[in-house]
Amino acid sequence: MTKVWAIAWKDLRSTMGNVPGLAMMLLAPLALAGLLGFAFGGGDSFEISATKVALASEDARPAAAPGQEAPPLAGDAFAGILTSEGLRDVLEVTEAKSAAAARARVDDGDAAVAVVVPRDFTAALYGAEGQKTAVELYVDPTQEFGMAITESVVMQALLDFNGARAAATVAVAVAGGPAGNDDAAQTAAARFVQDGGVSQALVIAERAPSAGEGEDASTVGLILAGMMVFFMFFGAGNVARTILTEDQDGTLPRMLTTPTPTATILGGKFASVFLTVSVQLIVLLIGGAILFSIDWGRLDVVAVLTVVTSAVASGLALLIISVVRTPGQAGAISAGVYLVLGLLGGNFGTATDAGTYATVQGFTPNGPLLRGWDAAMRGGGLADISGDLVVPVAFGLAFFAVAVWRFRRRYA
Amino acid sequence: MSIVEVQGLSKRYDPPKGVLAVDDVSFTIERGEIFSLLGPNGAGKSTTISMLSCLLRPSGGDATVDGHSIVGDAQAVKSVIGVVPQDIAVYPDMTARENLVFWGKMYGLAGVELTSRVDEVLELISLVDRQKDRVDKYSGGMKRRVNIGVALLHRPKILYLDEPTVGIDPQSRRSILDGILTFREQGMTVLYTTHYMAEAQELSDRIGIIDHGKMIALGTHGELVKIVGEEARVDVAVDRQLDGMVERWSGLRGVSKASVEEDHAELLVDDANEVLPHLFEEAAGGGSRITSVNVSEPNLELVFLHLTGRALRE
């Protein structure tokens, strides 16, 4: 073990003393990630501007039944949903005095959608079964995206309102009230709406880094992850190439004349490649966190990804070195292989989630790794990345096995 | 008592049709002697030393080093040999001390023993003052010394030196040769390969002459010289046609052989001092004038020439 460590430490020291090599390994990925992030626009944010909605509520309180209190206005509850805090990022709602005024705003381009709550909205909700009404959406046909969002929100709200009414009717029936006791159902539905049950149910799911600083960091993080893996291939290739340069320089044959088993020498070389790319990755992770405020995710997930990514990069580099004869050949072949893998695996921001290309990416050693890093940055745990690691781990083991076999034959 | 016993050693690269670099070579090296393998470039010297270093697996035959087979017990062989490769094989971006420490670990040294051996070797190769300088800042001779020092760290029983003086200045060469003679005085066995006849002649207790992979002669310097009959060689150039002159010279007493070699005549003579005046007389008598004379006393060059018909180019 002392000899393995001595060989690994010697190579690591040599690599760390190679300034141009270090620049390639550490600065290039950071610089490229920064540049690409900037090129994607102001720090690469992807923000959806809030849809302007003109809301006109013509809802009128229906007459109260004898001896009963008039139900509260459901239109107010509906308006409260649209203007709620949770939807403020997607809907910018202003109230219009009338349906006509709301439509006029759409016609004038001041709003994308006009939402008109009909006069009988409360009556339909709390009234006798079979009574129906409709909320009107008046839309600017050029604002498809805003219309879709508004329609979705309104649809969800109406579903909840209808659900509240149905739930109340069933509850009264189950409680043993007389059939057709609409008064009790109305009261129950009104209580349900007023108590906030609807508004709490109507939420829009947000992904964790979906807005502001977090989103910027995540996108730069994805780019940096791609660059990291890509440049780790080169970093590993550079260190692995020392096997060939040492062979040419005579230090490797000399090592083989010492009472050091071939397996130990190869073990030291393998360890030096693995250690170097691990250090490279850790420095890049720290650099990304400091320079771009990237949250790489949970420490245990990052640790596992670091080990697997380093193992894949090391295994691939050693495999290539094991099948070529000279450092020159290694340089040319490595560059070609890394470039093709980078393109296929999505290291240049070309990753997709579906289609043939995604399938191809899934069978590259680097594509699933990038998905793993993506999942980590989204806060995923070990269970979330385990599926993404199957293919890279298989590749890594296969690369190492073939490289060991080839080297043992060559230096036996 | 032999420390190295080589029996029928052969090496063919890329069998079955590849080059037969070493062909059924056998010899022994006694403890404490300097044994030289002398031969031109490509003769098979380095291949032989590579097999004895367990770097190359023989195609045939075997050898034992300190009783260990190079085929069956390579690790044991490696622990008793020190190998100085032809090209400098140390790390240029490390200091001399760092190199020695690293290589010491490769030889299994550690702790206090490693430190003391590194100090001793630095003293031996006269690099104590420069031990903390990177090797790539050294002169060629200093690098050669580090190259040799690495092989001495573990006090090997036998030191292999593969043409260690190729391409270096005369002063460094002298220093290395003196060092090797010192190793012998200390009782170390040395296997030395060279294509420099003078080095083999100066250093060696015994010499094996190798050519085209075959051991063509083996013995002490004196024994080898006797192969050519202890005659001196005289190369003579004249200003006229050589053929007639060679005929006249071959009839002289003391001249055993005379032949035309390109632009000069080559004569083998018993005593050059005695024959030379007669050569001039015969030339004058034949109407020619001798333009140059070169006398070579019996040496390994002549032996090689005698055995192969070719010169051993230095």
Image (cartoon, grey):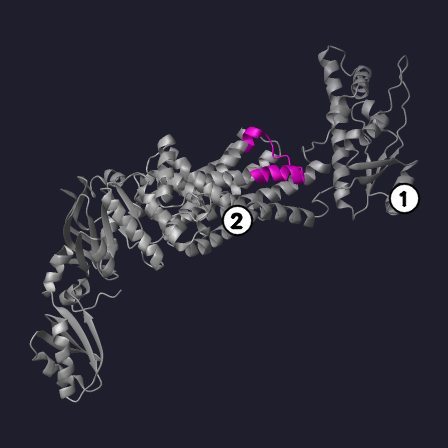
Residue annotated with mark 2: A21
Q: Nearer the viewer, residue B54 or A86?
A: B54
Which residue sits furthest bottom? B287
Q: Main secondary structure of the magenta part?
A: helix
In the picture provided, is A291 more to the left or to the right than A382?
right
Residue A21 picture location, percent across and down: 53, 49
Q: Residues within 10 Å of mark 1 (few under 14, many from 20)?
A: some
Residue type indicated by callout 1: Ala
Secondary structure beneath dot 1 equals: helix
Determine which quarter of the picture holds residue A161: top right
Q: Is residue B309 above or below residue A360?
A: below
Q: Is residue A82 visible?
A: yes
Q: Is residue A356 visible?
A: no
Residue type indicated by callout 2: Gly
Write down the chain letter for disc 1: A
Q: Residues within 10 Å of mark 2 (few under 14, many from 20)?
A: some
Which residue sits furthest top? A176
Q: Nearer the viewer, residue A386 or B98?
A: B98
Label of residue A104 in the image: 1
Residue B106 picture location, percent across and down: 35, 39
Question: Whole-Å distance between the Cαs marked 1 and 2?
Answer: 65 Å
Q: Residue at x 21, y 55 (%)?
A: B37
- Stretch of the chain drawn in magenta: A283-302
Residue A288 located within the stretch drawn in magenta: yes
Residue B247 picture location, percent across and down: 10, 83
